[in-house]
Image (tube, rainbow, N blue to C red):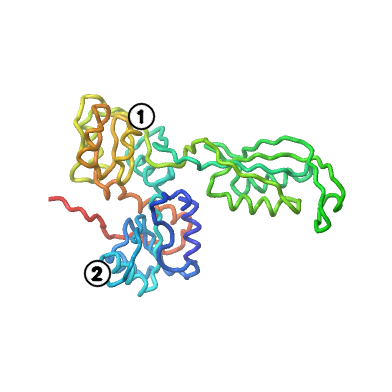
Amino acid sequence: MIVNDFIEAIEELCPSYYAEDFDNTGLLIGEKDMTVSGVLITLDTLESVINEAIAKNCNLVISFHPIIFSGLKRLNNKTYVERVVQKAIKHDIAIYAMHTALDNVSNGVNGMMSEKLGLRNTSVLIPKPKTIKKLTTYVPLADVEKVRNALFEAGGGRIGNYDLCSFNAEGTGTFNGNENSNPRIGEPGVTQFEKEVQINMTFSAHLESRLLTTLFKSHPYEEVAFEVDTLENKDQHRGIGMVGELETALGITEALSFVKSVFKTKTIRHSELNDRPIKRIAVLGGSGAFAIDNAKAAKADLFITADLKYHDFYKAENQIILADIGHYESEQYTKDLIHAFLTKKFPNFALVLSNINTNPIQYY
């Protein structure tokens, strides 16, 4: 097994294409073709985590948070980031981070929070725009089925909860190759009229390169006419935050006690309480103040997130209860999610769940 084998698996779970622009995801340290002796999975990559990796013979650390977020101008062993980077390089340990790429898939961070709360009928709170594209191409009638099926096999034709989606319209194509052409149908210098089918097919944006490669390999023409457009459709499986419903409504104090128990937090900072029952809950792991209005628009009774500032709590405006459970607490189950996914992909490989509690916040 090499590092790239694990990167390809992770890309299936949370394509790096959907990470936010400000983020720093992917392989931060190491080389893709390095042989992997063992994998350590963690929420954060601290020096203690690198020490754990060394002790457990793991030369690949897969982390949710990136240890390198902004540019490093020097490596002088003075900061915790510099120490981690230096030690990892010294011991030939690769580090891979996924962060907002995992935030922006429905079965990622927020899907895990929803699962722990037992939420039903869940949906993405803030769908990520421009994640669905459409391929249009023109294929000779005799080759349509072959090309269309090849595109389906490459992941084309999927939208929402549907697959094998395409639109096909028959027509007549014309072409006339010059002296340097080598047409499969017809001859250079002779205008050809050919029965063709226009294929229109949706696909997830991160698959564009794969779809085009497949198109060129399966299409019979020397020159393939095609176009790619971005659709306005919202992808219900991509985006940040989730919203869903409890099976049974709870009173507010009962609901907060339940949340406190599920996320093992010692305290919950919350907005002013009211007497309305809690049934519909929105969640967003990590810093989620930016999504308060979205949670209100989704008619959530309770919004569970972290890192709310003083004035953020005013935004509840008696329409919703805001609950800050802590950054680490909201994302603590993420490493279990990653471990479970990779264990299914690589059942006979050494995948180690870090024992280090990386929460920097202590409670008195």
List the single residue furthest toward the left. Answer: 364
Q: Residue 203: where, in percent of width, then height?
A: 57, 43
Residue at figure coordinates x 35%, y 54% from the top left: 335
Question: Label 2 is placed on what type of residue?
Answer: Lys
Provide the secondary structure element on which disc 2 rests.
Answer: loop
Q: Residue 250: which quarter of the image?
A: top left
Q: Is residue 337 above or below residue 96?
A: above
List the single residue furthest toward the bottom. Answer: 90
Disc number for residue 78: 2
Q: Nearer the viewer, residue 278 or 21?
A: 21
Residue at figure coordinates x 33%, y 71% from the top left: 86
Q: Which residue is mark 1?
A: 297
Question: Label 1 is placed on what type of residue?
Answer: Ala
Provide the secondary structure element on which disc 1 rests.
Answer: helix
Residue at figure coordinates x 71%, y 39% from the top left: 198
Q: Nearer the viewer, residue 295 or 352?
A: 295
Q: Residue 166: where, in percent of width, then height?
A: 64, 38
Q: Residue 319: where, in percent of width, then height?
A: 27, 27
Badge 2: residue crowd in 10 Å (few <14, some 14–19, many ≥20): few
Q: Is residue 68 above or below residue 323?
A: below
Q: Residue 209: where, in percent of width, then height?
A: 59, 53
